[in-house]
Amino acid sequence: YAGGGMIHSGAGECVVQLAEKAGIPTTMTLMGLGGMPTDHPRAIGMLGMHAARYTNMALEACDLLIAAGVRFDDRATGKVAEFCPDAKVIHIDIDASELGKIRAPHVGIVGDVGEVLTELMPRVEANPRTAWVENVESLKTAYPLLIPGADDPYSPYGLVLQTANLLDDEAIITTDVGQHQMWAAQVYPFRRSRQWLTSGGLGTMGFGLPAAIGAALAAPEAPVICFSGDGSLLINIQELVTAVEENVNVKIILMNNNSLGLVH
């Protein structure tokens, strides 16, 4: 269970190595997407209220939860008392105030996620956990992520997937906040850390365009795509002037539903 702390510490590769060595199905929060490639055999997608059903079912059945750089946010856990009810919890976070704030861990480790996992790796025995992995795969087959309109480029999911097909892994994806954000998070094939820039806990509408401009200035050779909604884009639409003045390589994909869809 890996989150934004994994991204900030540059620990994505450490998480991948641990998952491979110990046969651990791995889920990511909204802010952790890309730390493990979404098509990795041990990746089981984003957890929580916008997750595939199988992801949450796998978490419910697990007996050990390694929480790396996460906050146990309610959109990830739901009712926290019923989240991973049978699991021993190891919580790793650089911020000591996060340990035990929401969910009391059986083992709490204050430290940089990458440094902690690097120290932990030699102490972990290689184990493919074949039965557990096969159980999770059977759940995935029975309860997959539902993607209506995946083949229709004029549907929300289809638009995100068609956009992904036109880009390589050098592309940087930003979003505002709302339904478009969740559609992108659910189906875009993120394969590296910091490929995905979005506003998590603060839910900052208007984040996407300024973030895209900043990303384009920092990485001028990379294509930058900003998924936005009609409500969010209007909040900082004046930054189009900045984009023009700086001549940045930013493309905006506006998903207009004439409402604040997630609120509605």
Image: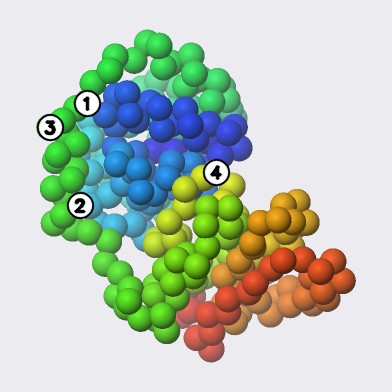
Mark pair 2, 3: CA separation:
14 Å
Mark 2 and mark 1: span between their CA atoms? 18 Å
- Give the class, few, some or many, for how many residues have Cα within 10 Å of label 1's Cα (few <14, many ≥20): some
Query: Is residue 129 in view?
Result: yes
Pointer 2 or 3: first along the chain = 3
Going from N to C along the chain, the mark reached first, 1 or 4, is 1
Q: Nearer the viewer, residue 229 or 104?
A: 229
Mark 4 neighbour class, 10 Å CA radius: few under 14, some 14 to 19, many 20 or more: many
Secondary structure beneath dot 3 equals helix
In depth, the one of 251 and 56 nearer the eye is 251
> How far across and down, in percent of the image, does residue 136 sit?
19, 43
Quarter of the figure with the N terminus: top left
Cα gap from disc 1 to disc 3, whole angstroms: 9 Å
Which residue is at 81% across, 69% downward?
A: 247
Judging by the rendered image, the residue that carries numbered circle 3 is 131
Q: Nearer the viewer, residue 106 or 188?
A: 188
Q: Amino acid at mark 1?
A: Pro
Mark 2, residue position? 140
Q: Earlier in the sequence, mark 2 or mark 4?
A: 2
Instruction: Determine whether, in the image, residue 81 is placed left or right of residue 245.
Output: left
133 left or right of 33 in image: left
Residue 223 lies, in percent from the top left, at 64, 62
Distance (Cα) linking label 2 and label 4: 24 Å
Please name the residue that numbered disc 1 is placed on: 128
Mark 1 vs 3: CB contact within 8 A: no
Mark 2 residue crowding within 10 angstroms, few (<14) / some (14–19) / many (20+):
some
Neighbourhood count class around disc 3 (C-alpha, 10 Å): few under 14, some 14–19, many 20 upward: few
Residue lying farthest to the right in this orientation:
245
- Provide the residue designation for mark 4: 193
